[in-house]
Image (spheres, rainbow, N blue to C red):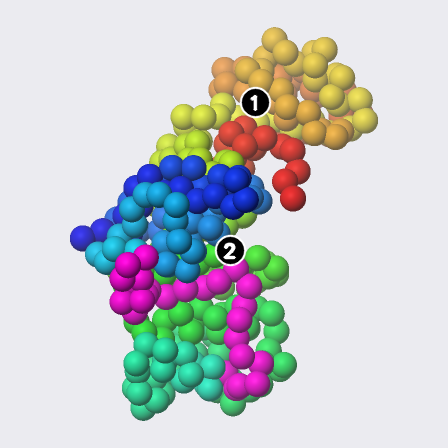
Amino acid sequence: MAPLEVAGLRKSYAGHEVVAGISFTLARGECYGLLGPNGAGKTTTLRCCLGLTAPDAGTIHLVGEPVPARAREARGSVGVVPQFDNLDPDFTVAENLLVFGRYFGLSDAATAGRIPALLEFAGLTGKENARLTMLSGGMKRRLTLARALVNDPDLLMLDEPTTGLDPQARHLIWERLKQLLQQGKTILLTTHFMDEAERLCNRLAILDEGRIVATGSPRQLIAEHIEPQVVEIYGEAAPVWAKDNARNFVKRIEISGETAFCYVEEQNLAPLLALTAGHPALRILHRPANLEDVFLKLTGRELRD
């Protein structure tokens, strides 16, 4: 039994189709990522999978249960970290966990027995009696992750779990999520951070306008959709210079502001770098292609609101 199976999922709002017939299946013990710009349908997909939003078409099986028909039963084996924290500000850290345990039919004694391990996992040991007003944003996000583990779920659904966090807090959450994967948990992750997806996801799907436009492991997507090397050329004259001088060495040039992104095959990298070296006014950054390059190629560089 797959932790989650989605086939032909569709959902529209006011005549606009925000999820347009997508299908995917999670394997047990993997982290599966849903990537996409704002409005691509990521959060709506998660809400449909949890039975919180009724789909217009398609089938969903969550931990073996049909959704939405048996969504309540299925959610008993699922942990959720929503896009925005919804902790109760009137409760202490421990009280937030105790109350949440009751939603799963757990006794206070059973939940209390799990609290020390959950707080240790979240890096919140000694904060049992702290009010939420005493916690930083990173602490609150880690508490939300700990809360999602109260029922010892088989599957975790994480909707942009590190948005708004500083680099130290993000890295700590990544470390904790890797620990959960090592324990055999399955994770469905939506994120805007390409480095997060590259670090955590075994497989992922890139969504755009409600459709899956590419799927595979991060390495597969980079190999299949983008040239292996990128030379970024910065400066007021960089876009014009790149168009006039670099075209013989690059497969593709993308312009964004005062930056020219040159996508290069291995054999043309050295000649291009030698060419740029003769122009000290240009600033150069050479790097391997990454998942963000794939994402921007497939979904575009235009700002999405």
Q: Could you tell me what secondary structure mostly forms the magenta stretch?
A: loop
- Position of residue 113 in the picture relative to residue 121 (left or right): left
Residue range in magenta is 68-93
| Label 1 residue SS | strand
Residue 250 visible in the snapshot: yes
Residue 199 visible in the snapshot: no
Where in the figure is residue 9, as x and y percent of width and height? 36, 43
| Label 2 residue SS | loop
Tell me the quadrant of the picture where the C terminus can be found: top right
Magenta span contains residue 34? no
Where in the figure is residue 186, as x and y percent of width and height? 31, 57
Figure check: 89 above or below 52: below
Residue at 44 percent of width and 44 percent of height:
11
Figure check: 221 above or below 67: above
Mark 1 = which residue? Answer: 263
55 vs 135, nearest the viewer: 55
